[in-house]
Amino acid sequence: MKLTETVKVDEKGRIIIPKDMREKAGVKEGGYVKIRADEKGITIEPLGPIADKYFGAFKITKWPEDLDEFVIEVIRKWWTRKAT
């Protein structure tokens, strides 16, 4: 079942997506959407969290005690390999 609504565009070009449409499409507060425009109109597509896209892709056996130091070391190793 397709939902159809008429909404008003404000002075800054914003619209309010009705709650029933947000729920049906999976658009959540704080989430992101992809917006495409062509000659036929504008399409708004919800985007899932990046973490969901890679869920299960990496196996972590032990988290580092200091994540900042871990990230710095990984970047240092990457930079060293890139330079050679």
Image (spheres, rainbow, N blue to C red):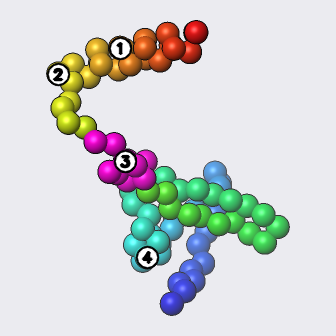
Q: Residues within 10 Å of mark 2 (few under 14, many from 20)?
A: few
Does 52 appear in magenta? yes
Q: Label 2's element?
A: loop
Image position of 38 with respect to 6: above or below: above
Q: CA distance from mark 2 to mark 1?
A: 13 Å
Picture disc at residue 24: 4
Outermost residue toward the bottom? 1
Q: Which mark is residue 73?
A: 1
Q: Earlier in the sequence, mark 3 or mark 1?
A: 3
Q: Residue at x 58, y 9 (%)?
A: 84
Q: Depth-wise, is mark 4 or mark 3 nearer the camera?
A: 3
Mark yes or no: residue 71 visible: yes
Q: Residue at x 59, y 64 (%)?
A: 44
Judge from the rendering whether residue 53 lies leftward or rightward of residue 2; answer left or right: left
Picture disc at residue 57: 3
Q: Position of residue 54 (x, y in %)?
A: 40, 49
Q: Which residue is mark 2?
A: 65
Residue 19 sits in which quadrant?
bottom left
Report the residue at 64% width, 51% height from top.
Answer: 12
